[in-house]
Amino acid sequence: MSVDEKMDCGRRRLLLATSAAGGAMGVAAAVPFVASLTPSERAKAAGAPVEADVSKLAPGEMMTVEWRGKPVWILRRTPEMLATLEKTDDLVTDPKSEQPMQPEYAQNEARSIKPEYLVVVGICTHLGCSPSEKFKTGAESGLGADWPGGFLCPCHGSTFDLAGRVYKSKPAPTNLEVPPHKYLTDATLLIGDDGTA
Ligand code: FES
């Protein structure tokens, strides 16, 4: 998405938020905006599920799709990346994602339906900043010789492992959110609907 498109997207989200907060006046203001969207844009703005084709993701690569205006990360983890999770088990606050905000299929060490693919909302659970990927390991990462790869939130320093699990003694209270999702085929993910609603 180009910078202009992103700005346009941001303006649209702001319009939606403003109209939601503005009661009857807001609804009136939203009508021309909604009418200007294509049917698929209207569905997206309303929170419809979105499909993601993960077939082109190479091991170790991550893609981002937008769902309900939020970035959803899909990381294809290598066997080496998955092996780090055993080591970080003791360093994170909620290793099995037992806090109630997680779907059942996130309540395991890899926090995923298929261990190879991590699917999380890329928004810090502290105050909503956007964490950065820190996939380089060791000293090269700038996060210490023991860093096994993961994510760093630049705002207040919360760190997350390669399953989006927050490290102990960090400001973020919970792991990164796993959105509802399911596989339609081996290569197609549906984000926003896991069939339980
Ligand atoms: S918003 Fe991420 S650590 Fe505060």
Image (tube, helix red, strand yellow):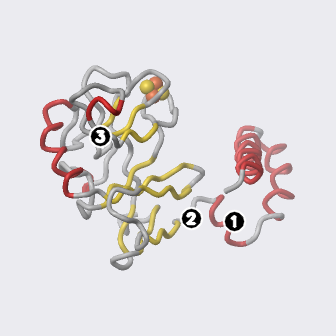
Comes first in the chain, label 2 or label 3: 2
Q: Mark 2: which amino acid? A: Ala
Task: Identify the mark at residue 48; answer none if there is no mark.
Answer: 2
What secondary structure is marked by label 3? loop
In this rendering, is residue 15 above or below 144?
below
Instruction: State which quarter of the image contains the C terminus.
Output: bottom left
What secondary structure is marked by label 1? helix
The residue positioned 19% from the left and 57% from the top of the image is 79
Compared across the picture, whether 91 is left or right of 15 comes to left
- The residue tagged 3 is 149
Q: Nearer the viewer, mark 2 or mark 3?
A: 3
Ligand number 1: quarter of image: top left
Place of residue 137 in the rendered image (x, y in percent of width and height, measured from the top left): 28, 38
What secondary structure is marked by label 2? loop
State the CA–CA distance, disc 2 to disc 3. 32 Å
Q: Mark 3: which amino acid? A: Gly
Place of residue 118 in the rendered image (x, y in percent of width and height, measured from the top left): 33, 55
The residue positioned 20% from the left and 52% from the top of the image is 80
Q: Nearer the viewer, residue 39 or 120?
A: 120
The residue positioned 44% from the left and 48% from the top of the image is 121
- The residue tagged 1 is 41
Comes first in the chain, label 1 or label 2: 1
Instruction: State which quarter of the image contains the N terminus.
Output: bottom right
In this rendering, is residue 4 above or below 128?
below
Compared across the picture, whether 190 is left or right of 145 comes to right
Comes first in the chain, label 3 or label 1: 1
Compared across the picture, whether 92 is left or right of 76 comes to left
In this rendering, is residue 19 above or below 79?
above
Q: Are marks 1 and 2 in contact (CB under 8 Å)?
A: no
Place of residue 167 in the rendered image (x, y in percent of width and height, measured from the top left): 27, 29
Callout 2 crowding tier (Cα within 10 Å): few <14, some 14–19, many ≥20: some
State the CA–CA distance, disc 1 to disc 2. 9 Å
